[in-house]
Image (cartoon, rainbow, N blue to C red):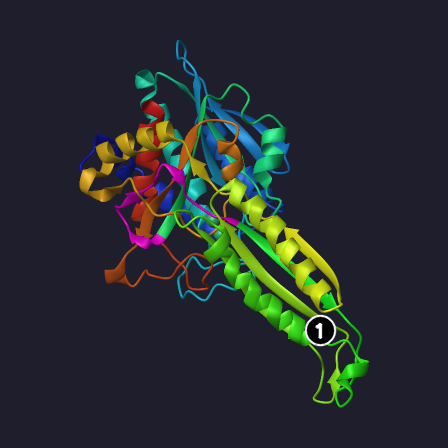
Amino acid sequence: MNHALIAAAERFRDWLVTTRRDLHQNPELSLKEKRTGMTTADALEKLGLKVRRNLWGEGFIADLDVPGAKGRIALRADMDALPIQELNQVDYCSRVPGVAHMCGHDTHMTMGLGAARLLVEHRSQLKKNVRFIYQPSEETPPGGAKGLIAAGCLEGVDEVYGVHNQPLLEVGKVATCTGPMTAAADTIRMRLTGRGGHASRPHEALDPIPAACALVSQLQSLVSRRVSPSAQAVVSITRFSAGTTHNIIPDHADLLGTVRTFDAAIRDQLDREIGQMTAGVAAAHGLQHEYEFERGYDSIVNHASGAQALCKAAIEVVGEANVDAKYPAQTWGEDFAYFLQHRPGAFFVVGSGNKAKGIIEPVHSARFNVDESCLVIGSAILAKLAMG
Ligand SMILES: [Zn+2]
Ligand SMILES: [Zn+2]
């Protein structure tokens, strides 16, 4: 790892670390990223970028225009923290009780700033104009991506890229893929309603519990019998609730679960077929039913051209041995998905873990942390990507 951009970013490592720790100590929840937006927009403005603030909430864009350059590449960073009490014992701990950057969006914003600084330093080598997109509310659906896109953040943009830190990957490693990278994560809710009664006289009641049990069993056949063996899907019932005590047949039974898919057609199919199955089982038992399929974020589907450009840049910066171009599709959700529905590009992860230093906690853990060398590496890769 001796690329010139790494060396250049190493020269301002202290600034990267200070910037990240400042953001880390002052986390803000989705749609409340006021200070976060102000400080990062100020920093980009100070570097000489043209900033358009409050494009959507605290979200903004910052343009680096280069005379004679053709086209524009966009790099997106997300800005929000999570409602978690940080349990790390570090001197830059979150100062806000119950709120912390436990998904590492502080590192993404810092990588954006680092890339901007590198690109300003290497302005003469730029062939494309660059746009930084700072997006609020990634963690809370419907998410800020759709809002910012509707507000025009992709106007004049030809390609778009997003980065996430990944503590389950050692620092220095980079991964991406062509095609689906994250799942569409949807929530299902079902209620079967019968008629309650005395447990000793079931024939006078309409018991929803055996029907709900049958429905849970039936649902297991959807992925195995209705989804192509070459495709992937998950249907999990995660909560089954009915009744209050031993001698009362309850009125209704409630089921809650999750559906994870990587293909829009299979997602629609499961929505439809879970609904049909719920209606069918309810009818077979003489019950009423309610069914809801609540959509979370769409699946991120990386474009082949975007993944290729990313791998090329990453290989130059960290070496071929450290770049995984076939990262398996992840079951978490990300609203970067929507950017790729409008422009070609790709999403990638930068390793932020370090087993030797005990940095192994996943994102969303109260003890999540990163090896801050990821700030240098992320900055260099984003800059390289923009330089083409
Ligand atoms: Zn997250
Ligand atoms: Zn995240």
Residue tagged 1:
208
Segment tinted magenta in the rendering:
167-184
Residue 100 can be seen in this image: no
Question: x%, y% of residue 258?
Answer: 55, 58
Residue at image x 62%, y 57%? Answer: 188
In the displayed structure, does residue 26 sit left or right of residue 358?
A: right
- The quadrant in which residue 87 appears is bottom left
Q: Which element carries disc 1, helix, strand or loop?
A: helix
| 130, above or below 280, in the image | above
| 334, above or below 358, in the image | above
Identify the residue at the far top of this view: 68
Quarter holding the N terminus?
Answer: top left
Q: How many marks?
A: 1
10 Å crowding of disc 1: few (<14), some (14-19), many (20+): many
Q: Identify which residue, 166 or 261, lies in the foreground.
A: 261
Residue at image x 69%, y 57%? Answer: 291
Question: x%, y% of residue 76?
Answer: 47, 35
| 335, above or below 345, in the image | below
Residue at image x 41%, y 43%? Answer: 181
> Is residue 170 highlighted in magenta?
yes
